[in-house]
Image (spheres, coloured by chain):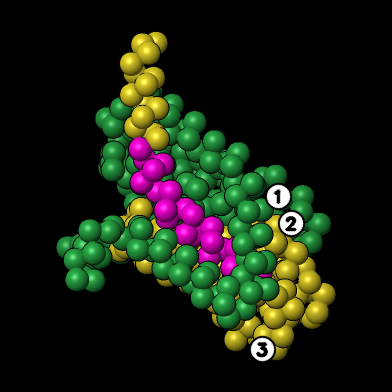
Amino acid sequence: MINRILEKISEKWIFLIAVIALYLILFFVNFNLASQAFFQLIYLFQKIIPVFALVFAFMFFSNIFFEPKKILKFVGKGAGLKGWLISIIGGILSTGPIYMWYPLLSDLKEKGMRDCFIAAFLYNRAVKIPLLPMMIYYFGLPFTIVLSFYMILFSIINGIVVDKLVQMKLK
Amino acid sequence: METSILKESFVKTLNSFKQVAPIIVGVLMLVSLSIVAIPKGFYQSVFTGNKIIDPLFGAIFGSVAAGNPITSYIIGGELLKQGVSLIAVAAFLLAWVSVGLIQLPAESLMLGKRFAITRNIVSFITAIIIAVLLIATLSCL
């Protein structure tokens, strides 16, 4: 019976139900912590709404202007240096939490975006230009410059390694 | 531009969002819980000054923790003030932004389980390597 119900509910709903169940249990076990988490959740929702709108706009316009064939040209199998540049710059310029970009990347992956470029995009989200002054304040200019340089460099290495490993496992 | 193209694109985008909504909400709930459940002082009690174990712990805690990078800077800054080594703090900052255990279910569902697990493992190892290289480079400057 339970198996039949689970078969009908997709993985994403099972995941959400499990997290809600965790909150419900926590409300009985530790009401204070659960209510703090709930208020934090509302705060996070308020913060991510503009990012949600931005991602929605990106996806909306990409659906209008970019056909799968065009996307493949930039970040598909044949894409070289241009693909890396787009992934690196896109990752650096993207704002908001990492998980907000999964829908767009998932969409692009379905259209043929290579794993190495997705990995590079996600890694470069670590380099955030608006946050650099804050990093300089806490850790100093040399630390910030060297760290940013290594993060960009390793985003390429990271992308290549992830791509190779994923392909290797598939074979 | 034709209205039908705009409408079609809008519906397509909206459907994509409907598909991911339960995952996004679930991840946000987990992130919120981790932010309030893990006190900032906890991190300071973990690092002991060991040059081998500290960066490893730094990367582990950075991978488990979630939130805005600014929070990691604040915690990292506090850790430095408490005498935690720069290599551990660097590994912590790098893993915080590049590895996401809390987001892993969402990443797996949307980008593929194989890709998500591989990317997070590689990013974890890379965080430690960069931390070591960063400190080596800074000591040469």
Q: Is residue A144 left or right of residue A167?
A: right
Q: Name the quadrant containing residue B33.
A: bottom right
**Magenta residues?**
B15-36
Can residue B94 be seen by looking at this rendering?
Answer: no
Residue B77: image x %, image y %?
A: 77, 68
**Mark toward the viewer: 1 or 3:** 1
Please tell me whether mark 2 sits on a helix, a strand or a loop: helix
Asked if disc 1 and disc 2 are in contact, CB closer than 8 Å, the reply is: yes
- Using the numbered discs, state the Cα–Cα distance from disc 1 to disc 3 in whole angstroms: 29 Å
Q: Amino acid at mark 3?
A: Asn
Q: Amino acid at mark 2?
A: Met
Looking at the image, which residue is at 43% across and 48% down? B21
Residue A95: image x %, image y %?
A: 59, 44
Magenta-span inclusion, residue B111: no
Looking at the image, which residue is at 25% across and 65% down? A6
Number of other residues with Cα within 10 Å of mark 3, as a class: few under 14, some 14 to 19, many 20 or more: few
Q: Is residue A144 left or right of residue B127?
A: right
User: Which chain letter goes with mark 3?
Assistant: B
Q: Colour of chain B?
A: yellow
User: Which chain letter goes with mark 1?
Assistant: A
Residue holding disc 3:
B50
Residue holding disc 2:
A135
Q: Which disc, if any, is residue A131?
A: 1
- Using the numbered discs, state the Cα–Cα distance from disc 1 to disc 2 in whole angstroms: 6 Å
- Using the numbered discs, state the Cα–Cα distance from disc 3 to disc 2 in whole angstroms: 24 Å
Q: Name the quadrant containing residue A60.
A: top left
Q: Quadrant of the C terminus of chain B?
A: bottom right
Q: Name the quadrant containing residue A66.
A: top left
Please tell me whether mark 1 sits on a helix, a strand or a loop: helix
Q: Quadrant of the N terminus of chain B?
A: top left
Residue A37: image x %, image y %?
A: 63, 65
